[in-house]
Image: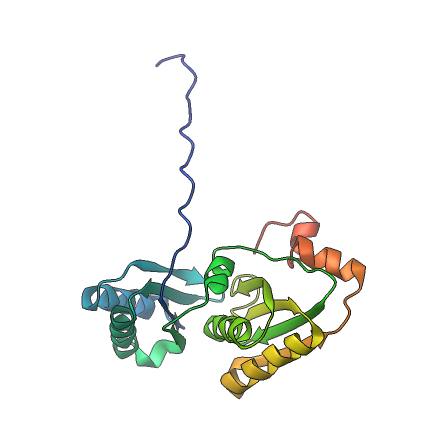
Amino acid sequence: MSDQPQISTPHPPKPALVIDPALALLEFSSIAAGVQAGDAMVKRATLEVIHAGTVQPGRYLILIGGTVAEVEEALKAGKETAPDALLDHLFLPGVHGDVVKSLAGGRGSVGSEALGIVETATVSAAIQAADCGVKGAEVKLLEIRLADGLHGKGIVFFTGKVSDTEAAQEVIDKVLTPAQKVRSVVIAQLHDEMARILQSGTRFGSRLGWEQA
């Protein structure tokens, strides 16, 4: 055995998430059904982006991107494969770039403007809300959080002027179904202490050194 110290090779940086112009997401209650659907989707269409895996609480997500026609065809294949296990789905033929950045973990700034919060029952609904909000009003995304640590729910944080934040909420309210909605609020003037907390992140456990759940 060599006495030479082992040199670990650093992991290459993850490539930036690029989805343009179309995005789709399918959300399954069964992991087995999700894998089966993902296989059917990549066999049916040529996709530029596909990410898939489990999220809490025991669900399976498939996120795809590419040309409108190919994404739409793959989405159709996924929906046909296991309709009984399909919880929700989303198709955005012209997804907003800020939504893609937020999905990749990008975060905005709280600032001194109003804060809008949209809490949804599914991941798909949260992405839909984020896309509608930034397209429908002059607001910026602070954060999109999905599924893990939220028992499968989604939550979106917007910032902007009070009137614009309220306009974004109105657009979202018209698009989402009652079953997709949990709660939405607009805080006209966020306290500095809450702004500081939100800016640093929205997970409670991270402040106390807990491992992410």
Q: Residue furthest top?
A: 3
Q: Position of residue 114 (x, y in %)?
A: 71, 70
Q: Quadrant of the N terminus?
A: top left
Front residue (pair 29, 124): 124
Q: Residue 113 occupies which quadrant of the picture?
A: bottom right
Q: Quadrant of the C terminus?
A: bottom right
Front residue (pair 123, 130): 130
48 left or right, relative to 61: left
Front residue (pair 196, 4): 196
92 left or right, relative to 205: left
- Does residue 50 sit above or below 169 in this rendering? above
The residue sitting at 76% across, 67% down in the picture is: 190
- Does residue 113 sit above or below 183 in this rendering? above
The residue sitting at 45% across, 73% down in the picture is: 124
Q: Residue furthest left?
A: 43
Q: Position of residue 198 (x, y in %)?
A: 69, 59
Q: Position of residue 178 (x, y in %)?
A: 54, 87
Protein image colouring: rainbow
Q: Residue 28 occupies which quadrant of the picture?
A: bottom left
The residue sitting at 40% across, 37% down in the picture is: 12
- Does residue 57 sit above or below 8 in this rendering? below
Q: Residue furthest front?
A: 138
